[in-house]
Image: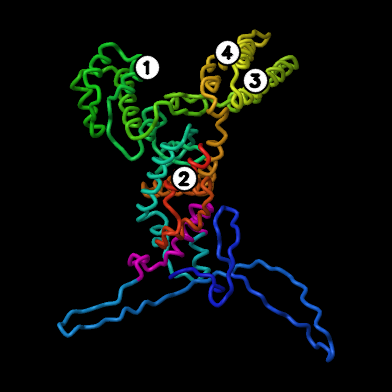
Amino acid sequence: MAIKDRGNQNAKQRSSANPEGGLKKINHQEIIITPPNVPAGSRFKGYSDFHVEDLNIEAVKIKYRLAVYETPSGEILRGRLPFNLNGRHFGPDLIAYCLDQYHGRCVTRPQLFEQLLGFGVEISSGELDSLLIVDKEVFHEEKASVFEAGIAHSDHLNTDDTGARHDGKNGICTHIGSPLFCYFQSTFSKSRANFLEILRGRHTDYILSEDALLYAFDQGISVRAQDMLDDCVDKKFADKATWERFLKRKGVTSEKDRRIATEAALLGSAIFYGLRPTMGIMSDAAGQFDILIHALCWIHEERHYRKFMSLTENEQVLIDGIRDAIWNLYEQLKEYKDKPKGELRLRIEEEFDGLFTCKTESNAINDLLKNTLSRREGLLKVLDYPGLPLHNNDSERDIREYVKKRKISGSTRSMLGRKARDTFASLKKTCKKLGVCFWDYLRDRTGKLGQIKPLSDLIAEKAVVAPA
């Protein structure tokens, strides 16, 4: 069974720009309407055109009659179903429509089920559930490829996380993205080790590389544990169980040393599989994201002052003045990004230190200033790396898509459902960044049309044209 536009047959077609970046084949029809009772002798003066946009959707039931023959030798020959059906009783366009409505348009499953029944589609609730989350390995694989291509071709990464309740338990969905791609991964942990596990993508090994050992040293691992790790440089461990046995055998028992060593080996794995040691990571001040070249969001930092509840008129005047000074610094940093100059850098650093080391009559405001000063390195990271962004708005915009889906459909219940939600949210946002219509993409993949390149290839092409 498939859903098809009735006007597809015997109609002129033209290409029309699609708002999401695709090209649609739209039926173009002309219907001539003459006035009733035209008097004899009247002269034709042309047409007065009136344009109408319409949509016509109906369910189509298709019976494939597979002819069967018996050869003279007794062999039975049977006609073959179209390869894109994969033996299923629902057509590729119907499957694409369900995926687009549920994962792409936030239509709830009960509403989608009622809609399909209203169209005349004979489908059960269980069959619809299966269409939405089962046998989606093609999409899961493409999501993994998108992540690898995005990491390889992005100059920096934006990251953030949000709640993702699953099967009655609180969880976390981590977003990683750039102007080229978007990636969501739901887990039950909000630790740095969890973030590093996500950064290594589909891989599960632990690697003690030089970068990993340097990270462990910077994080303050004990001398004894550092010496043990140094003896195993460039060694790989297949999985978590193998890594845990190694730590136990080496006598790395303290909680701090085990945590730092594990983070180091995960970072070594992520770098081995494509994460550059010079990658910029833009986030808010959450500690789990503080790896490599970690820059902090100025918009997020200013938000602390904007939300400050002034108890006196004097406090409000002080806050207003500080916010003006912050935005002045922000404008100077934007200028520096365009044209890095030594004298401008010195002025920015002096103004930053002068602003956030000053003392006011309000202890609450002084605490805010002190907290911002403690994040000086991350907020001024752009002075060393002008290519980094000043804010994390891109990540917050991307993750809003996930939050909207969560608010409408609630938590996930099965692992397949959680995996599908992460995958299609990633692919939809990536398609948008690449200028690909998500509906066209779904039809191409479910119908095996082969008209849209792998998204990983499009990421590589876009990176060459306009570097991230």
> In terms of sequence position, does the residue under pointer 1 or pointer 4 come before the other?
1
Task: Work out whether residue 6 can be spotted.
Answer: yes
Residue position for label 4: 370
Quadrant of res 383: top right
Q: Which element type, helix, strand or loop, lies under badge 3?
A: helix
Residue 35 in the image: above or below residue 438: below
Nearest to viewer (mark 2 / mark 4): 2
Q: Which element type, helix, strand or loop, lies under badge 4?
A: helix
* Image point (45%, 49%), residue name: 424
Task: Where is residue 315? Give x, y as percent.
Answer: 71, 15
Q: Are marks 4 and 3 in contact (CB under 8 Å)?
A: no
Taking the view exactly as shown, the residue that stands out farthest to the left is 73
**Residue 219 numbered tag:** 1
> In terms of sequence position, does the residue under pointer 1 or pointer 2 come before the other?
1
Task: Where is residue 394? Give x, y as percent.
Answer: 55, 36
Which residues are the magenta region? 82-111
User: How many labels sit on residues?
Assistant: 4
Task: Where is residue 153? Give x, y as percent.
Answer: 44, 37
Circle 2: residue type:
Glu
Estimate how packed mark 3 is, as few (under 14), some (14 to 19) or many (20 or more) residues with alpha carbons within 10 Å. Answer: some
Q: Which element type, helix, strand or loop, lies under badge 1?
A: loop
Estimate how packed mark 4 is, as few (under 14), some (14 to 19) or many (20 or more) residues with alpha carbons within 10 Å. Answer: some
Residue 389 in the image: above or below residue 35: above
Tell me which secondary structure the magenta stretch mostly adopts. helix
Task: Report how far apart the C-alphas of labels 2 and 4 lie in the structure.
Answer: 45 Å
Task: Report how far apart the C-alphas of labels 1 and 3 lie in the structure.
Answer: 31 Å
* Image point (47%, 32%), residue name: 155
